[in-house]
Image (spheres, rainbow, N blue to C red):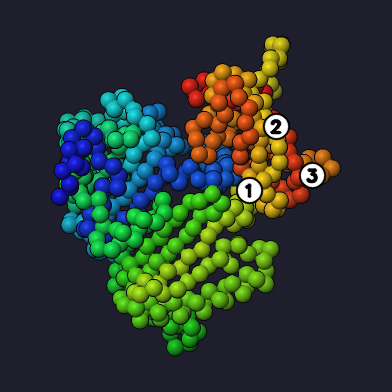
Amino acid sequence: MAPPAMAAESEGSVPAPTRAFTPRTAVAFYADVQRASKSAIWSAITNKAAPLVEQLQALQRAQMSSLPTPQGLPEFQGTDLAEIAIAVEGEKILSDLHAERFDPNSGFIVVARLTRTVDMEKLIQQGLEAIEKEKPGMRGPIEKSRRRVGAAELFDLSTEALIGHKLPFTVSVALGPGKDGTIVAIGRSENLQAFLAGKTEGKLRGQVNDQLSRRGQMWLYLPVPQDVAKSLGSGGGSNANPMLAGLAQSIDNVREVSLILSFGSSQIDFALDFGCADGAAAGQLSQGLQGLLGMIQIGAQQNPASAPPFIGKIKAAAEGATFRLTTAFTMRDFDLAFKNANRGVTAAGPRAAPPAPKPEAAPAPAPSLPPVEVEFVQFSSEEQESLRPAKLRVQNRSSRPVKELKLTFTYLDEAGRNLGQWTRNHSGLTADTLVGGGTTGIVDCLAFNVPAGAKKLTVTLHEVTFTDGEKWSGN
């Protein structure tokens, strides 16, 4: 039963996503996107991935131009996602999914928190209109099922009409105000109503909850069904490598798996835990994987140019009945991954159409002095990495504090030769205000895609966003 304080809070707002978990949860996933996105490594990855994402989207549009476009919800955007929690009940859920069947006693709930508060009624009507356009005739039954549970509006869905499969339970969707934004949830109606009423504990079984809740902004927990473990553990035949055969047999004793990601300033810490039947089983698994890991790392040392750096950072050890494997991903790992991905997208992409002729531009107005001037001071590190901290001098000529700047960095070598460019938005890493009104300050800024040999850079200012939301745009 929820504590009285939580129950009282749920009367005026929908519970937070973390409250979706219970000791009956068999599979759990949680992501604190809002907290992770404040890390420097997150910004580096998203900026590095932006050109690739644009290429993939263009390729997808070209390949699917003849297909109808699904209706979206203007009030909801992917960048609004702050938190998401997925809780699945049913000890045999993985086996059921493999067999394409669902146990009537199983259930699930997905809860997401948006970073901003939206007009709830407007969002509901947009959702109903989108469903009616995709599935004519469905709006009426969904609208009739509308009811209030706690602080949320609840609707029943016809899964057979939506996805073509009938589930052995009713699926509902709910929307309501949360403590810090808007809550959107979907799941088995009984599970969802219990969550909305504040009856879910927000805790996983036993020590699993403590192990996961203290580590990382994103994590996944799932049990390993015995039939799945045995099928994986049966890979050691009489002709198999003795080391691999022993490893395959030890997997038979794995009972649960947990994955944890923690986003920091320059790396993502990765931990993979295997909960085993006992300490002896964890030791056996450790022995088998240590040997395999040693072979992989020796191979990486022999070919360092193409081997991702995270391989050399992998550590593995048994702690009680748990076998833990850890490593860290840095921008060098992502540089290599994006480089390979870009090659694949470029090879698969269609030929670009010639650009349409631009209309004759009207005479430009007389140039005026921008409200902010930005000047490069120095790199904070001499290490030859594509992600490098830099110091910038920002002079704010206006009386309003600045929140964000859109800049282009042009990287130069010692002789002043152009080595490349990078354009993205820059904001304060620890505060909402980058520089105050009418002041000049030195700010730390991460420079991305820095070529080897870059010694300095020039800065071009494109856009200024003030803390009041107003923007100034230049070239």
Q: Residue at x 48, y 51 (%)?
A: 263
Secondary structure of the residue carrying tag 2 is strand
Q: Residue at x 38, y 28 (%)?
A: 75
Q: Is residue 222 above or below residue 275?
A: above
From the top left corner, tell me how far across and down residue 266 is, in percent: 56, 51
Q: What separation in Å lies between label 3 and label 2 (alpha carbons)?
A: 17 Å
Kindly check if marks 1 and 2 are in contact, taking CB atoms under 8 A apart as contact.
no
Residue type at the position of mark 2: Glu
Residue underneath mark 3: 413
Q: Quadrant of the C terminus?
A: top right
Q: Is residue 461 left or right of residue 22?
A: right
Query: Mark 2, residues whose alpha carbon is within 10 Å: few (<14), some, or many (≥20)?
Result: some
Residue underneath mark 2: 375
Q: Which mark is residue 387?
A: 1
From the top left corner, tell me how far across and down residue 298 is, in percent: 62, 75
Q: Is residue 281 above or below residue 126?
A: below
From the top left corner, tell me how far across and down residue 113 is, in percent: 34, 39
Secondary structure of the residue carrying tag 3 is loop
Residue 189 in sight from this viewpoint: no
Q: Is residue 440 left or right of residue 427?
A: right
Q: What separation in Å lies between label 1 and label 2 (alpha carbons)?
A: 19 Å
